[in-house]
Image: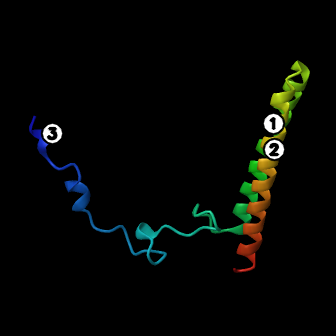
Amino acid sequence: MADQDHDLWAEFDNLEPAGPDLVEGRPGGVSQGFGLRTGVRSAKVALGFAIYALALGTTTVLIGAIVFAGQGEWLLLGLLVLIEAVFVYGFRQLLRQVRNRRAGL
């Protein structure tokens, strides 16, 4: 029962800081990333992620579209088209952020 009475944060409070902040005002040195605060610093990595996300989303939507069209589920097929539009919009936003990162903005 004595273990329940001690402060759970005592060990954490006694630790020294991990290091200086990499970005002023952001404790722990968390970087700003390329616009999404993901920590990605390279425009090439951001572009690769954007292409990967679009390819994965498009593949999933195409498989679903084939299945739903075969079953005559037209409402679900329309939903998949809407989901694909969201994937394309997200891809375009990531590309815009990559261009801004490369331009040094």
Please, is residue 78 above or below residue 33 in the view?
A: above
| Structural crowding at the residue carrying mark 3, measured as other residues with C-alpha within 10 Å and reported as few (<14), some (14–19) or many (≥20) | few
Q: Position of residue 31 (x, y in %)?
A: 53, 69
Residue at screen point 63% across, 68% down: 41
Residue at screen point 81% across, 36% down: 80
Q: In the rendered image, which quarter contains the C terminus?
A: bottom right
The amino acid type found where label 2 is placed reads Glu
Q: Position of residue 84 (x, y in %)?
A: 81, 44
Residue tagged 1: 80
Dots 2, 1 in contact, CB < 8 A: yes
Residue tagged 3: 4
The amino acid type found where label 1 is placed reads Leu
Q: Position of residue 101 (x, y in %)?
A: 71, 73
* Mark seen at residue 84: 2
Q: In the rendered image, which quarter contains the N terminus?
A: top left
Residue at screen point 87% across, 27% down: 74
Q: Mark 2 and mark 3: span between their CA atoms?
A: 51 Å
SS label for mark 3:
helix
**Nearer the observer, 99 or 44:** 99
Give the mark toward the camera: 3 or 1.
1
